[in-house]
Image (spheres, rainbow, N blue to C red):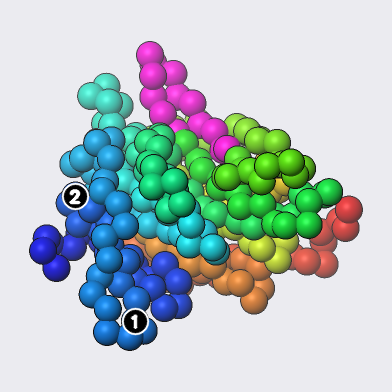
Amino acid sequence: MPEQVVFWKWISPKLLGLVTQTSVYHWSIEGESEPVKMFERTANLANNQIINYKCDPSEKWLVLIGIAPGAPERPQLVKGNMQLFSVDQQRSQALEAHAASFAQFKVPGNENPSILISFATKSFNAGQITSKLHVIELGAQPGKSSFSKKQADLFFPPDFQDDFPVAMQISHKYALIYVITKLGLLFVYDLETATAVYRNRISPDPIFLTSEASAVGGFYAINRRGQVLLATVNEATIVPF
């Protein structure tokens, strides 16, 4: 590599994502190809610690997430910064977010699945803390039914004011969004409506890594104590609707 790699991750079974201080590369394990530069990091990610990188199932949308020190009066609540990149348009959008995930979703009246991105934000402005979950469609198909964007509050209990989302997994089996926070809270939202379904603390230790558990429609998480947790919904108690 021409530059030091600061973060790397499998973004698909055959594709490795490599993040350097300035750029992002993809490296296929097939064939003999070298890493291919995909895009340059946006200014909002300068001096950030990169915590995640993901691509959507079509590999047309890429998202890079970093965290940076919080406001001087609220240093514990770190800032989350996100870069969303469109491969087709070769264009980046800089947003505030601590965690994000892609999903495919079939909108009624459209035979082709829509690509959605969900992202969770928690910011401190003018003495106020705002915590939100957003779900929007990417690259809506012309002349087809589209997904209308949704937004919901993330309700942090009073003693979790400095806690923030560190990971998000979307269950394709149940069409649910799992938002996992640093201090071990789990929020569960319905993907289609962004309705809050559940909130509980699942780990007393900080969580730093999660991965989809697609077979059971849940996710794995690893906390600082080294525990590997598996979380999913109890299918027997879900009301079919």
The answer to whether residue 184 of the structure is visible from this angle is: no
Horizontal and vertical percent for residue 137?
61, 43
What residue type is disc 2 on?
A: Thr
In front of the other: 69 or 23: 23
Considering only vertical position in the picture, is 12 above or below 180?
A: below
Q: How many other residues sit within 10 Å of disc 2, few (<14), some (14-19) or many (≥20)?
A: some
Q: Quadrant of residue 71?
A: top left
Main SS, magenta residues: strand
Q: What residue range appears in magenta?
A: 122-134
In front of the other: 134 or 230: 134
Residue placed at 86% from the left, 56% from the top? 239
Left/right placement of residue 113 relative to residue 81 reads right
The answer to whether residue 64 of the structure is visible from this angle is: yes
Left/right placement of residue 130 relative to residue 103 reads left
Read off the residue under disc 2.
22
Horizontal and vertical percent for residue 225?
35, 66
Q: Quadrant of residue 133?
A: top right
Read off the residue under disc 1.
29
Query: Magenta segment: does it hold 132?
Result: yes
What residue type is disc 1 on?
A: Ile
In which quadrant of the rendered image does the N terminus lie?
bottom left
In front of the other: 214 or 54: 54
Closer to the chain start, of discs 2 and 1, is: 2
Q: How many other residues sit within 10 Å of disc 1, few (<14), some (14-19) or many (≥20)?
A: few
Considering only vertical position in the picture, is 9 above or below 142?
A: below
